[in-house]
Amino acid sequence: VIRLDSLIDYCTPSPRTGYIFGACDFLQPDTARKFLLATGARFVAGYQKEIPWTESMLVDSLFLSYLLGGTMKWVRTKHGERVPPLRQTENFEIMRSASPQRVAGMLYRDFPLAHDITFSCFTLDRKQGRKPALDNSFETYRRSVDRARRLVRDL
């Protein structure tokens, strides 16, 4: 069993580093807050419940791919159907974001299983003179995931 304090001691404090913990139920909001405060990390991502390693590997790979390389921009037709602009213009636009929270939102949009298996990305909103606030992508994007599911269900 690996303890949080052992991980914190092992991690080098850096505001440019992010951490991903896959296939375990390690990442609860209180654990994420303590880890981010102690390490000064840019983000920490993982799962709030235990999941099979194959699903974890797929979601972790997609998250890293979106974070480092971007994702294809989708457009909605007047009927709510999502289609890539590739069909219309013979090329496509890549959306990039340096925000791990936005990347998690794009991942939920394109691959709802990531939300179903509780993939979460935590960051600290460190505003001047205030106590750091914990941002949780799982809660932030819950409504948009539910709305996207309703659109698909109603088609």
Image: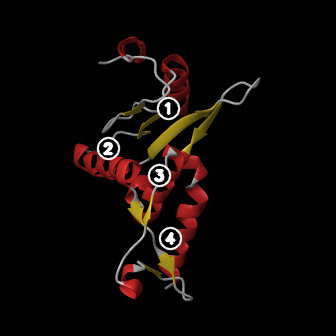
Q: Earlier in the sequence, mark 1 or mark 4?
A: 1
Q: Residue at x 51, y 55 (%)?
A: 105
The circle drawn on residue 51 is 2
Q: Quadrant of the N terminus?
A: top left
Q: Earlier in the sequence, mark 2 or mark 1?
A: 1
Name the residue beneath numbered marker 4.
149
Name the residue beneath numbered marker 3.
103
Position of residue 63 measured from the top left corner of the image (x, y, whole percent): 37, 49
Q: Amino acid at mark 1?
A: Arg
Asked where in the image residue 47 lies, by quadrant, the reply is: top left
Name the residue beneath numbered marker 1.
42
What whole-number distance in Å separates the C-alpha atoms at marks 2 and 1? 24 Å
Q: Earlier in the sequence, mark 3 or mark 1?
A: 1
The residue at the far right in this view is: 129
Q: Amino acid at mark 2?
A: Ile
What whole-number distance in Å separates the C-alpha atoms at marks 1 and 4? 30 Å
Q: Residue at x 43, y 57 (%)?
A: 107
Q: Considering depth in this image, is 33 or 88 the residue closer to the camera?
A: 88
